[in-house]
Image (cartoon, rainbow, N blue to C red):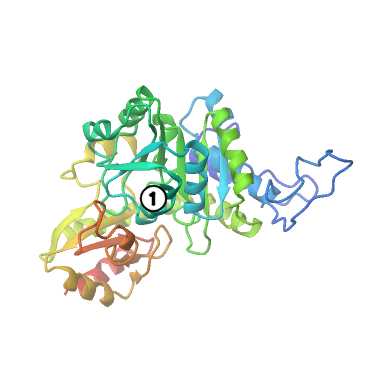
Amino acid sequence: MSHNNFETIAIHAGQAPDPQTGAVVPAIVNASTFKQDGVGNLRGGFEYARSGNPTRNALETLLAAIESVDLPQNERRLTSGFAFASGLAAEDTLLHAVLSPGDHLVIPDDAYGGTYRLISKVLAKWGVEHTPAPVNDLSAIEAAIKPGKTKLIWVETPTNPLLNIGDISQISDLAHQNGALVAVDNTFASSYLQQPLSLGADIVVHSTTKYLGGHSDVIGGALIVKDPELAETIKFHQNAMGAIPGPNDSWLVIRGIKTLSVRMDRHVANAKRVVEFLSEHKRVAEIYYPGLESHPGYEVAAKQMKDFGGMVSFRHKDGELAALKMIERTKVFTLAESLGGVESLIEHPARMTHASAAGSVLEVPKDLIRLSVGIENADDLIEDLSMALG
């Protein structure tokens, strides 16, 4: 791509018109294997669809392009994207690719429950240790590092579900000084609002199920890296472990990314209206949104994000039971897990997305409510929340 602007790249990268038909949309190639013109003489490099598929390759080219917009041209050309069957499949592949038994990693003390479950219940059996630390406290992250053992610092920013903000540049400098890599889960922000590779991160992680897909109709994950050697390691593990998406799922994520910028602008605008409403409501005890100037991570978020995102969490003043009743009363906000789709969702993290963190240092408040603010009419969203809060 010769153009440098995100919106143009999102629509054109990896999506050149078909040379034979002129089709402007990538084809869904539902093939598991590909004819070879002699042993080892591959057409376009394709042999077996676990190793590569034209539709998935188009998505991977697009993922690399949208996550390297802010990099210098020479680094953009080196950036590689890898697509997976889910966000957790991407995480699992990465963790096996960069860690070995006996290694250690640092994770946020309010990380996504699925990430914590994977690390604490699955990876721990493989002999990998972990230490939780607040992503917004650089000294705590430094104290959590085990010299010679810590090989990875895992970052969510904003975190899920408390929307804490980590300074990607500072964390990356700290990690590299200690011989560790930095992986940033960029799902909450999206590639449009935040570019971790340009801030020093080594790996970007996405659940493409969320904002990149954007329509609650596909499950997927992604890893994006700018170091060719690391890319080769991930490519090997992607093929060896096999947790790849099919062509139909790849195509749906490509279609979603085309409208990512316009959707994110609306998500953000609606979230700000919702936060303004919640800030004035007597039954709201505390709001977690990095766009509030009172948020402890406001200045860092303003520095490293284009805008503050569409995710909002808040605590109900009257406690857990009141929070549960409020959640069940909404009509426009749908009670459901996941996030980042065009429709607004509401959930109770302690009993839903973060139930696996119960009883651990990552346990979330029981009166916490998480909103994924969609792209509906903002007045309708506010009316719905007003009715539900009572």
Q: What element carries label 1?
A: helix
> Relative to 380, does residue 207 appear above or below in the rendering?
above
Relative image position of residue 147 (x, y in whole percent) = 33, 27
- In the depicted view, which residue is nearer to us: 300 or 241? 241
Is residue 373 among what the camera can see? yes
Question: What is the quadrant of the C terminus in the image?
Answer: bottom left
Q: Name the residue under label 1.
A: 265
Whether 68 is drawn above or below 91: the answer is above
**Residue sitting at 30 percent across and 61 percent down?**
371
Q: Which of the two residues, 34 or 195, is positioned nearer the viewer here?
A: 34
Residue 95 appears at what percent x and percent y? Answer: 47, 42
Q: Residues within 10 Å of mark 1 (few under 14, many from 20)?
A: some
Examine the image and state in which quarter residue 185 appears: top left
- The residue closer to the viewer here, 11 or 33, is 33
User: Toward the viewer: 390 or 108?
Assistant: 108
Residue 54, position in %: x, y? Answer: 70, 48
Location of residue 148 in the rendering, given as x and y in whole percent from the top left corner:
37, 27
Res. 153 in view? no
Q: Is residue 156 left or right of residue 17?
A: left
Q: Which residue is drawn at 52% across and 45% down?
A: 93
Q: Which residue is drawn at 38% across and 55% down?
A: 117
